[in-house]
Amino acid sequence: MDFYLLLGIIAVGFAVPLLIQRHRLFGSAVTLFAVLLLTFIQSSSALATPFLGALGTPDSALKTPQQRQLDERLKLNPGGGQYSGVEYVQEDLNRSQTLSDREIQNTIKSEIQEDLVAMVSNGSVILSGTVKDRQTAQNIVEEVKAIPGVHEITFELGLKEKSNL
């Protein structure tokens, strides 16, 4: 049980009997307030900012230029020195060849000339390191997504040249 829920139940359990004995209307108002407070606490995770919900959205779901721009803005930290996010590769059923994790890692090391660290597990790639700028980071993410066998990429890339959108 959530800590805040338990705390709210205990508070209501002690307060309601005391208040009902003194003032019935006031006690009803306090009880209603406590129920609303508990409801809000339980639903607060559902009220999370919608901008964070867009992070990691597949490219195919981003229809308008404004959605694409918001997605790119979310990948930059507030100072513009970090480009991070999660991207998914749309499955291509016509692709006949997929590479093993070791082959994916070797491809990333040999084809991408930046100083990056890549970890691969079951086609999921975690990429970290420092690159020149946001455009370079975007290109690297797209190159990794194009490797057969990659279905997801999580990236944390520092930017030598800060970027602003």
Image (cartoon, helix red, strand yellow):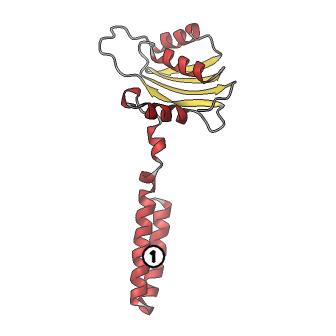
Location of residue 90 in the rendering, given as x and y in whole percent from the top left corner? 37, 22
Image quarter of residue 43: bottom left
The image shows residue 51, relative to residue 145, as above or below, that is: below
Count of marks placed on residues: 1
The residue singled out by tag 1 in the image is 12
Residue appearing at x 56%, y 30% in the figure: 84
Crowd class of label 1 (few under 14; some 14 to 19; many from 20; radius 10 Å):
some
Image quarter of residue 21: bottom left
| Outermost residue, bottom side | 22
| Outermost residue, front side | 65
Location of residue 79 in the rendering, given as x and y in whole percent from the top left corner? 66, 37
Q: Nearer the viewer, residue 68 or 37?
A: 68
Residue appearing at x 37%, y 31% in the figure: 61
The image shows residue 66, relative to residue 40, as above or below, that is: above
The image shows residue 75, relative to residue 116, as above or below, that is: below
Q: Nearer the viewer, residue 134 or 90?
A: 134
| Outermost residue, right side | 160
Quadrant location of the N terminus in the rendered image: bottom left
Quadrant location of the C terminus in the rendered image: top right
Residue appearing at x 30%, y 15% in the figure: 93
SS at badge 1:
helix
Location of residue 15 in the rendering, given as x and y in whole percent from the top left corner? 47, 81
Location of residue 88 in the rendering, given as x and y in whole percent from the top left corner? 42, 26
**The disc labelled 1 sits on which kind of residue?**
Val
